[in-house]
Amino acid sequence: MGVVRKTKSIELLLNEFKTQSTAISTIELIKRLNSKLNKTTIYRVLENLVDDGILHTFIGQDGIKWYAMCNNCTKSKHEDLHPHFECIECGEIDCLKTEVIIPEIKNRKILSSQILIQGKCEKCIN
Protein backbone atom coordinates (compact mmCIF):
# COMPACT_ATOMS: atom_id res chain seq x y z
CA MET A 1 0.00 0.00 0.00
CA GLY A 2 2.40 2.72 1.12
CA VAL A 3 1.90 5.62 3.49
CA VAL A 4 2.18 8.07 0.62
CA ARG A 5 -1.60 8.51 0.87
CA LYS A 6 -2.17 10.26 4.18
CA THR A 7 -5.59 8.91 5.04
CA LYS A 8 -7.55 9.83 8.14
CA SER A 9 -6.90 6.34 9.55
CA ILE A 10 -3.14 6.67 9.14
CA GLU A 11 -3.08 10.14 10.66
CA LEU A 12 -5.16 9.04 13.67
CA LEU A 13 -2.85 6.11 14.37
CA LEU A 14 0.36 8.06 13.86
CA ASN A 15 -0.89 10.81 16.19
CA GLU A 16 -1.11 8.22 18.98
CA PHE A 17 2.60 7.49 18.59
CA LYS A 18 3.61 11.14 18.24
CA THR A 19 2.04 12.02 21.60
CA GLN A 20 4.12 9.55 23.61
CA SER A 21 7.60 8.06 23.53
CA THR A 22 6.68 4.55 24.68
CA ALA A 23 5.35 1.58 22.74
CA ILE A 24 1.59 1.04 22.49
CA SER A 25 -0.16 -2.33 22.54
CA THR A 26 -2.81 -3.27 20.02
CA ILE A 27 -5.31 -3.56 22.87
CA GLU A 28 -4.58 0.01 23.99
CA LEU A 29 -4.82 1.37 20.45
CA ILE A 30 -8.20 -0.30 19.96
CA LYS A 31 -9.44 1.18 23.27
CA ARG A 32 -8.24 4.67 22.34
CA LEU A 33 -9.54 4.65 18.76
CA ASN A 34 -12.66 2.45 18.91
CA SER A 35 -15.01 5.40 18.47
CA LYS A 36 -13.13 6.56 15.36
CA LEU A 37 -11.88 3.37 13.66
CA ASN A 38 -13.02 -0.23 13.65
CA LYS A 39 -10.69 -2.96 14.86
CA THR A 40 -10.05 -4.38 11.37
CA THR A 41 -8.96 -0.97 10.07
CA ILE A 42 -6.61 -0.50 13.03
CA TYR A 43 -4.91 -3.86 12.41
CA ARG A 44 -4.67 -3.24 8.64
CA VAL A 45 -3.17 0.24 9.02
CA LEU A 46 -0.72 -0.94 11.70
CA GLU A 47 0.57 -3.70 9.44
CA ASN A 48 0.92 -1.24 6.54
CA LEU A 49 2.88 1.14 8.77
CA VAL A 50 5.18 -1.73 9.76
CA ASP A 51 5.60 -2.75 6.11
CA ASP A 52 6.52 0.84 5.24
CA GLY A 53 9.16 1.09 7.99
CA ILE A 54 7.25 3.68 10.01
CA LEU A 55 6.53 1.39 12.98
CA HIS A 56 8.11 -1.77 14.31
CA THR A 57 6.46 -4.47 16.34
CA PHE A 58 7.42 -6.91 19.07
CA ILE A 59 5.72 -9.25 21.50
CA GLY A 60 5.48 -8.26 25.17
CA GLN A 61 5.81 -10.63 28.12
CA ASP A 62 2.05 -11.26 28.12
CA GLY A 63 2.04 -12.32 24.46
CA ILE A 64 0.40 -9.10 23.26
CA LYS A 65 1.73 -7.31 20.17
CA TRP A 66 3.24 -3.87 20.77
CA TYR A 67 4.12 -1.14 18.26
CA ALA A 68 6.67 1.67 18.42
CA MET A 69 8.00 4.29 16.02
CA CYS A 70 11.02 3.24 13.96
CA ASN A 71 14.07 5.44 14.16
CA ASN A 72 16.35 4.16 11.43
CA CYS A 73 14.00 2.05 9.33
CA THR A 74 12.93 2.47 5.74
CA LYS A 75 10.69 0.35 3.57
CA SER A 76 13.74 -1.33 2.00
CA LYS A 77 15.77 -1.56 5.25
CA HIS A 78 13.68 -2.59 8.24
CA GLU A 79 16.02 -3.88 10.91
CA ASP A 80 14.97 -4.01 14.54
CA LEU A 81 17.94 -5.24 16.51
CA HIS A 82 17.41 -3.25 19.69
CA PRO A 83 16.01 -4.42 23.04
CA HIS A 84 12.78 -3.27 24.68
CA PHE A 85 12.26 -2.62 28.39
CA GLU A 86 9.00 -3.53 30.14
CA CYS A 87 8.31 -2.14 33.59
CA ILE A 88 6.81 -4.88 35.77
CA GLU A 89 5.10 -2.27 37.94
CA CYS A 90 3.46 0.27 35.59
CA GLY A 91 3.53 -1.85 32.42
CA GLU A 92 5.14 0.75 30.16
CA ILE A 93 7.34 -0.60 27.39
CA ASP A 94 9.91 1.44 25.53
CA CYS A 95 12.73 0.96 23.05
CA LEU A 96 16.19 1.00 24.55
CA LYS A 97 18.95 2.86 22.79
CA THR A 98 21.39 0.33 24.22
CA GLU A 99 23.42 -1.62 21.71
CA VAL A 100 23.01 -5.36 21.96
CA ILE A 101 25.43 -7.45 19.99
CA ILE A 102 23.64 -10.22 18.18
CA PRO A 103 26.14 -12.91 17.17
CA GLU A 104 26.47 -13.72 13.50
CA ILE A 105 25.02 -17.07 12.56
CA LYS A 106 26.56 -18.92 9.67
CA ASN A 107 24.38 -18.97 6.53
CA ARG A 108 21.81 -16.63 8.11
CA LYS A 109 21.04 -12.91 7.94
CA ILE A 110 19.36 -11.59 11.09
CA LEU A 111 16.85 -8.81 10.42
CA SER A 112 15.04 -8.59 13.73
CA SER A 113 15.25 -9.86 17.27
CA GLN A 114 12.86 -10.14 20.20
CA ILE A 115 14.82 -8.99 23.24
CA LEU A 116 12.57 -7.99 26.13
CA ILE A 117 14.20 -6.83 29.35
CA GLN A 118 11.97 -6.57 32.40
CA GLY A 119 12.40 -4.62 35.59
CA LYS A 120 11.29 -1.32 37.10
CA CYS A 121 11.44 1.96 35.16
CA GLU A 122 12.86 5.17 36.57
CA LYS A 123 9.38 6.31 37.70
CA CYS A 124 8.66 3.09 39.60
CA ILE A 125 12.12 2.36 41.03
CA ASN A 126 11.73 4.93 43.83
Image: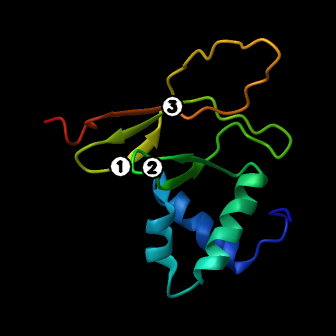
Q: Quadrant of residue 99?
A: top right
Instruction: Report the residue marked by disc 1.
Output: 92
Q: Nearer the viewer, mark 3 or mark 2?
A: 3
Q: Quadrant of residue 1?
A: bottom right
On the image, the x and y values in percent for residue 113 come to 61, 32
Marks 2 and 3: in contact by CB < 8 Å? Answer: no
Mark 3 and mark 1 lie on one chain; the one further toward the N terminus is 1
Residue that sits furthest to the bottom in the current view: 35
Residue 60 image label:
none
Per the image, label 1 sits on a secondary structure element best described as loop
Marks 1 and 2: in contact by CB < 8 Å? Answer: yes
Classify 77 as above or below 51.
above
Quadrant of the snapshot with the C terminus: top left
Mark 3 and mark 2 lie on one chain; the one further toward the N terminus is 2
Q: Nearer the viewer, mark 3 or mark 1?
A: 3
Q: Which residue appears at 54% of the width and 19% of the height? A: 100
Instruction: Report the residue marked by disc 3.
Output: 115
Camera-side residue of 6 and 92: 92
> Mark 1 belongs to which amino acid?
Glu
On the image, the x and y values in percent for residue 78 come to 75, 39
On the image, the x and y values in percent for residue 107 come to 83, 16
> Mark 3 belongs to which amino acid?
Ile
Residue 22 image label:
2
